[in-house]
Amino acid sequence: MGMWGKVIGGTVGLMVGGPVGAIAGIMLGHAADRGDFGTVGTHLRRALPLDSARLAALVGRRDQVFAISVTVLAAKLAKCDGPVTRAEIDAFRRYFRIEAAAVPTIGHLFDHAREDAAGFEPYARQLAATFADNRVTLEQVLGALYGIARADGPINRLETDFLGKIGLILGLTQMEQARAANPSFSTGQDEDPYSVLGLPPGTALNTIRARWKQLMRENHPDQLASRGVPAEFITRATERVARINAAYDQIKRDLTS
């Protein structure tokens, strides 16, 4: 069993408090360990009266913050323009690689989040604070949310406004938000190497080198893993490292030839 079952099951008690919450948390924790989620749905539904906007602030581990936050953000995004569709749910499961055994439990949290009257902002702020040292993860989360929004058709105004607010709360630059919104943004054979490094043309080589080193520290898979980035996003970071290196090599060749 991967991250999702253990994280969600282990944090349900924090959502409810008191004896009922403790019992529900214990039951779901055991279910996660056994991979047996089918017997706890009824208990989970009874154990979610607390305003879920408090949850992200209560959990302390990065994987917990990530799992809870992206589930709530995805649920509220899916609902912001009307009824949640099966295509949106399937896209959420695909983008965040939810294990089959964990789907029922994640589904209950998803359902609770979309019906909860609390706003999405606390979760976005908690995610931004937890991964402030890892902009790659924040950009990829926003990109996944854009993918979920596209799952049932073109992104509409309500979804655009919602995603724009999340991008601002996450502290992403306009370029980072553009990359998240459009997977083909600034890619391909004619990709501007300066854009990849986030620098204007004509920047001095020593500044370019310093920027390259900074981006390598921020994006290198080993560094991301050590900072608690979910494994789901490590592969994408590897691809970004390749682009950063290619851009730096091209600029060096152009400036020294």
Image (cartoon, rainbow, N blue to C red):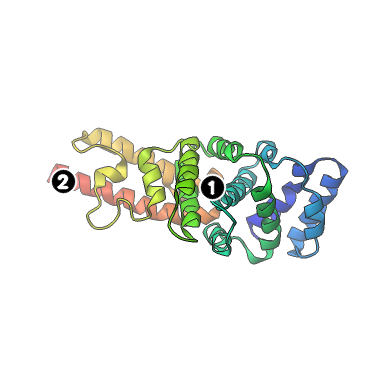
Q: Amino acid at mark 2?
A: Asp
Quarter of the picture holding the N terminus: bottom right
Seen in the picture, residue 3 relative to 11 is either above or below; the reply is below
Task: Give the structural element (helix, strand or loop) at label 2.
Answer: helix
> Residue 81: percent from the left, percent from the top?
53, 51
Residue most toward the right? 19
125 w.r.t. 220: above or below: above
Q: Position of residue 79 (x, y in %)?
A: 58, 51
In the rendering, which numbered label is found on residue 229? Answer: 1
Q: Is residue 152 left or right of residue 72?
A: left
Residue 218 x, y percent position in the rendering: 43, 42
| Distance from Cα at disc 1 to Cα at disc 2 | 35 Å
Left or right of 143 in this view: 126: right
- Pointer 2 residue: 254
Taking depth in this image into account, of 18 and 214 the one nearest to the observer is 18
Residues packed near mark 1 inside 10 Å, few (<14), some (14 to 19) or many (20 plus): many
Would residue 206 be visible to someone looking at this image? yes
Residue at left offset 37%, top offset 46%:
178
Query: Are the residues tagged 1 and 2 within 8 Å (C-beta)?
Result: no
Residue type, label 1: Val
Residue 125 coordinates in the image, percent (x, y):
56, 36
Q: Choose between 194 and 15: the one closer to the eye.
A: 15
Question: 215 or 112, which is in the foreground?
Answer: 112
Q: Residue at x 64, y 66 (%)?
A: 100
Residue 142's tag is none
The secondary element bearing badge 1 is classed as loop
